Image (tube, grey):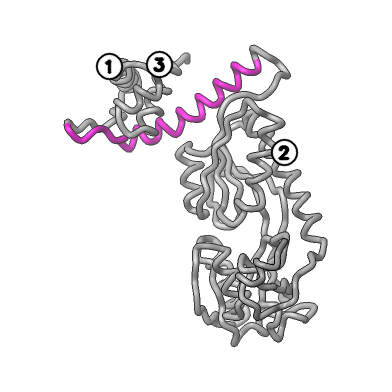
C-alpha cells in the first residue's frame, strides 16, 4: 500500500522534535510556521493519531505515538536520501547526514580519525556524533536519534544488530611503581586487598564488580568518576588500581605520570567492540562506509597496542618545572 503522506511532512515533524517548537522548526526548514503547522496537522489526520501535544503559551511536545513516528521518520528520511543519491549518481560520492553514537571511553581513540580522515574520503557526508554511556546509546538508536553506535556488546539488549570490529581482554592498570606493576600478570585474587578506582559509566562498573565477585573478591571502591582520564590520573598517583579494556597509545596520565598495564591471568571473558544499529534497519551506503572505516581504525589501534611505548621514569619534579624543560 502506498503511504498517503509525504516525506516533507515527516521532515517537518522531525524538525519540530529537534527544534522543540514550531517557530524554530520553521526557521530550520526555511518555511513559514503555518506551513509546519498545517503539514503536521494533515499528517496526524492521515495517520489517525495525535503526534504533538499543543499547549497554548507552552509550545509543543511529542505524544507517545509521536515519539514512535519520529523514530521511524528519521529512518525513512535517511533511506530516501540514500535512494536519491543512488538514482542520480550511481557509484558517485556518498552524500547526506549520519548521526553516530559513541561510548565515551572510545571517543578519544576513534573520533579524531573519523572527523578528519573520513571527512577527506567522503566530504559530502555530514557526520554528527553523540557521546554517552551504554543506556544513552541504546536509547538514541531505538528512537532514531542515531543511525549507528560504537560501543561494547555488553548489556545492549534486544532489537539491535551488531558487527564486531575488535575483541578486547580486560587488563589491570596500575601506577608504574606499584608492587604488582612489574609482574607478567596478576590474578583477581591478587587485587583483593587493593583499593579500586572505578569508572562509573555503564557498562564498566558492573563488569569490573562482576569479575571480582565471581572469584569471591569484594571490591574496595575508594574513588569513582565518569571521566576516564580522572580514573587514569588517580591510578597514576598510586591511589588504587582499575580494570580497563581499551589500551591507551601511551602509558602515562594527563599529568605525565607513568602507568603500567598488567595482563589479567584470571579466567575472564573477552569483550567485543561493536557497531550497533536497529535490527529492522538496512544499513545505508553512508552507514556501511562508516562501519568499514571504524573497522580499519580498530585494526590500526590493535597494531598500536601491540607496540610497547616508551614511558618516562617516575619523577617528583613539579609539572611546571618539567614543562619549562620541554622544548
Q: Is residue 15 magenta?
A: no
- Residue with the most extreme left position: 56
Q: CA distance from mark 1 to mark 3?
A: 18 Å
Res 259 quadrant in image: bottom right
Q: Is residue 42 left or right of residue 148?
A: left
Q: Is residue 176 above or below residue 247?
A: below
Q: Residues within 10 Å of mark 1 (few under 14, many from 20)?
A: few
Q: Earlier in the sequence, mark 3 or mark 2?
A: 3
**Is the stretch drawn in magenta largely helix, strand or loop?**
helix
Residue 5 got which mark? 3
The residue to which callout 2 is attached is 292
Q: Secondary structure at mark 1?
A: helix
The residue to which callout 1 is attached is 34
Q: Is residue 150 above or below residue 25?
A: below
Q: Earlier in the sequence, mark 1 or mark 2?
A: 1
Q: At x 72% / y 74%, what residue is drawn?
A: 260
Q: At x 81% / y 55%, what residue is drawn?
A: 303
| Front one among 77 and 261 | 261
Amino acid at each position: 500500500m502506498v503511504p498517503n503522506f509525504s516525506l516533507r511532512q515527516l521532515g517537518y515533524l522531525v524538525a519540530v522534535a529537534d527544534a522543540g517548537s514550531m517557530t524554530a522548526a520553521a526557521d530550520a526548514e526555511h518555511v513559514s510556521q503555518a506551513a509546519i503547522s498545517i503539514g503536521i496537522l494533515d499528517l496526524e489526520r492521515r495517520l489517525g493519531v495525535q503526534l504533538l501535544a499543543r499547549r497554548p503559551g507552552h509550545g509543543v511536545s511529542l505524544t507517545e505515538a509521536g515519539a514512535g513516528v519520529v523514530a521511524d521518520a528519521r529512518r525513512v528520511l535517511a533511506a530516501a536520501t540514500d535512494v536519491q543519491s543512488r538514482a542520480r549518481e550511481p557509484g558517485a560520492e556518498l552524500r547526506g547526514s549520519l548521526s553516530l553514537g559513541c561510548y565515551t571511553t572510545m571517543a578519544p581513540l576513534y573520533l579524531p580519525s573519523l572527523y578528519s580522515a573520513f571527512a577527506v574520503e567522503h566530504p559530502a557526508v555530514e557526520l554528527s556524533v553523540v557521546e554517552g554511556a551504554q543506556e544513552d546509546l541504546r536509547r538514541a538508536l531505538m528512537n532514531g536519534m542515531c543511525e549507528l553506535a560504537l560501543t561494547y556488546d555488553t548489556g545492549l539488549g534486544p532489537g539491535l544488530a551488531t558487527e564486531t570490529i575488535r575483541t578486547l581482554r580486560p587488563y589491570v592498570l596500575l601506577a608504574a611503581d606499584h608492587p604488582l606493576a612489574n609482574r607478567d600478570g596478576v590474578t583477581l585474587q591478587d587485587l583483593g586487598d587493593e583499593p579500586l578506582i572505578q569508572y562509573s559509566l555503564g557498562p564498566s562498573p558492573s563488569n569490573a564488580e562482576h569479575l571480582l565477585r565471581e572469584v569471591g573478591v569484594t571490591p574496595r571502591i575508594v574513588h569513582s568518576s565518569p571521566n576516564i582520564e580522572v580514573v587514569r590520573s588517580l591510578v597514576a598517583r598510586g591511589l588504587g588500581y582499575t580494570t580497563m579494556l581499551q589500551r591507551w597509545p601511551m602509558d602515562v596520565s594527563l599529568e605525565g605520570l607513568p602507568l603500567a598495564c598488567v595482563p589479567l591471568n584470571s579466567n575472564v571473558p573477552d569483550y567485543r567492540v561493536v557497531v550497533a544499529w536497529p535490527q529492522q534497519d538496512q544499513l545505508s551506503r553512508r552507514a556501511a562506509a562508516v562501519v568499514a572505516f571504524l573497522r580499519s581504525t580498530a585494526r590500526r589501534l590493535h597494531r598500536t597496542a601491540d607496540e610497547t611505548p616508551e614511558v618516562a621514569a617516575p619523577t617528583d619534579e613539579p609539572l611546571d618545572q618539567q614543562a619549562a624543560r620541554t622544548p
